[in-house]
Image (spheres, rainbow, N blue to C red):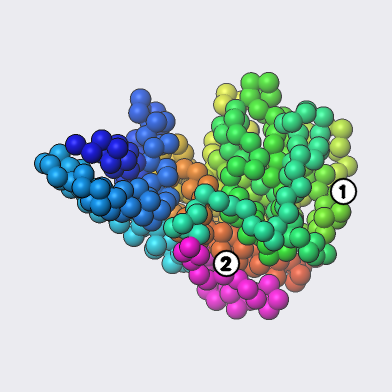
């Protein structure tokens, strides 16, 4: 029995199984199965190439497949490859599904309404070399990261990183991103890095920030930290070539919850102690695999649902239909409530087969989401320049429910 080959194939097989059939987080195996299945679900091509195809070829080349046990492992590898093919098939259809969601939220023919300079260079391709060969390497040579700048007085939990193009163009839009971790873990420079590096390479100034965590901090401490980040951007981002008049806020999981709360409570003095006069409004919000409920035991007022108003900024919400940590029904409900109330655009992209934290890698799925985010921001910025007095960025009303 080729033991090393067996261990490799068994690990991939287990991850593939949990990717196809996630275990709800409430069950005993929920958390472990989530971590095992996540990489297989988002990186089926890399998993097949690096952990099935190459080890199988090596096992044959070294003469290890000479027994019934060896052939049994080959059979397991073949079945696992079929499972990975199913996962890959679901991910390959994501781009078309997201495009339909964009049309549903922004109106048919929305691409024709983009300003020409913003539409130029929008990506419609999959970077296969990066997806297959180096999906976990996110850095780009044309982007500079300025690390550990202080925006508050809470030590390392009040530090942020700035990403900008090395040419430092002037008048750049800003994207702020907050990491996930259930408000009790996580750090900047960990999630949505393919998004931040891509936008920075396209001339944006991007911010990734730490914030205070439980149990030392409670709601609304985290939200106050994000408001401080926004205030910092208004004051300092021009030093890196940014024009903070165009400022998008995004987040993953708990960070998405926080980003939505910030977007829905602009300039609220209750969440800006000591900096009540700072402008904390945002141009639009990006909500990735987010949490939508209340904050632990602090009631419905700590949920973004409690703060939806007619003048909510445009939103793009992306959520996986196999998310074992946050049920997809919660994302559908939030998008539906936002659409019913807001006069601005709401794009709800439901990702088929996606797990939680789909934004970690250069995957087929997240590359499609990155392209959609860039296109969504181009649409918002195009409308921003033509906004009516009052500042609302109008949307085209369309029929149909989130899908």
Q: Residue at x 70, y 29 (%)?
A: 212
Task: Tell me if residue 333 is in the magenta stretch.
Answer: no
Furthest toward the top, the residue is 216
Vertical order, 37 against 215 (above or below): below
- Would residue 11 appear left or right of 266 to someone viewing this image? left
Q: Which numbered circle lies on residue 106? A: 2
Say which element carries label 2: helix
Q: Earlier in the sequence, mark 1 or mark 2?
A: 2
Tell me the residue that label 1 is attached to: 235
Work out whether residue 290 can be spotted: yes
Number of marks in the rendered image: 2
**Label 1, label 2: how far apart the Cα atoms are:** 32 Å
Q: Give coordinates of residue 350: x percent, y percent.
A: 45, 54
Q: Nearer the viewer, residue 382 or 14?
A: 14
Work out whether residue 256 can be spotted: no
- Would residue 138 appear left or right of 84 to someone viewing this image? right
Task: Tell me if residue 108 is in the magenta stretch.
Answer: yes
Q: Residue at x 81, y 34 (%)?
A: 152
Q: Which residues are magenta?
A: 101-129
Q: Give coordinates of residue 170: x percent, y percent.
A: 83, 64
Q: Give coordinates of residue 87: x percent, y percent.
A: 34, 53
Q: Which numbered circle lies on residue 222? A: none
- Would residue 68 appear left or right of 234 to someone viewing this image? left
């Amino acid at each position: 029995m080729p033991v090393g080959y067996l261990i490799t194939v068994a690990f991939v097989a287990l991850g593939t199984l949990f990717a196809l059939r996630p275990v709800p987080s409430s069950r005993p195996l929920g958390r472990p199965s989530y971590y095992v299945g996540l990489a297989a679900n988002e990186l089926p091509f890399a998993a097949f190439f690096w952990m099935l195809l190459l080890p199988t070829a090596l096992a044959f080349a070294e003469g290890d497949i000479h027994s019934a046990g060896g052939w049994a492992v080959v059979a397991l590898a073949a079945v696992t490859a079929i499972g990975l093919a199913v996962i890959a098939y679901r991910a390959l259809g994501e781009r078309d599904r997201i495009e339909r969601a964009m049309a549903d939220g922004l109106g048919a023919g929305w691409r024709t309404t983009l300003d020409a300079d913003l539409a130029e260079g929008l990506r419609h391709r999959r970077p296969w070399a990066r997806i297959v060969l180096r999906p976990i390497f996110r850095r780009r040579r044309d982007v500079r990261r300025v690390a550990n700048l202080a925006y508050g007085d809470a030590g390392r939990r009040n530090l942020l990183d700035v990403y900008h193009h090395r040419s430092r163009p002037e008048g750049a839009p800003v994207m702020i991103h907050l990491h996930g971790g259930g408000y009790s873990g996580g750090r900047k420079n960990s999630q949505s890095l393919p998004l931040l590096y891509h936008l920075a390479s396209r001339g944006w100034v991007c911010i990734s920030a730490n914030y205070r965590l439980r149990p030392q901090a409670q709601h609304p401490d985290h939200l106050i930290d994000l408001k401080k980040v926004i205030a910092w951007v208004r004051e300092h981002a021009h030093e890196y070539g940014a024009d903070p008049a165009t400022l998008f806020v995004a987040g993953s999981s708990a960070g998405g919850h926080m980003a939505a709360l910030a977007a829905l409570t602009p300039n609220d003095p209750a969440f800006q102690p000591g900096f009540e006069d700072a402008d904390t409004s945002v141009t639009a919000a990006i909500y990735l695999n987010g949490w939508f409920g209340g904050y632990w035991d602090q009631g419905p007022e700590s949920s973004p649902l409690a703060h939806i108003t007619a003048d909510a900024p445009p939103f793009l919400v992306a959520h996986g239909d196999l998310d074992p940590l946050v049920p997809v029904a919660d994302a559908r409900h939030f998008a539906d409530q936002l659409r019913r109330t807001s006069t601005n655009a709401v794009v709800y992209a439901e990702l088929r087969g996606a797990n939680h934290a789909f934004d970690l890698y250069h995957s087929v799925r997240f590359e499609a989401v990155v392209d959609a985010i860039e296109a969504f921001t181009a649409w918002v910025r195009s409308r921003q320049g033509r906004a009516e007095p009052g500042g609302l960025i109008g949307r085209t009303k369309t029929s149909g429910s989130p899908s």
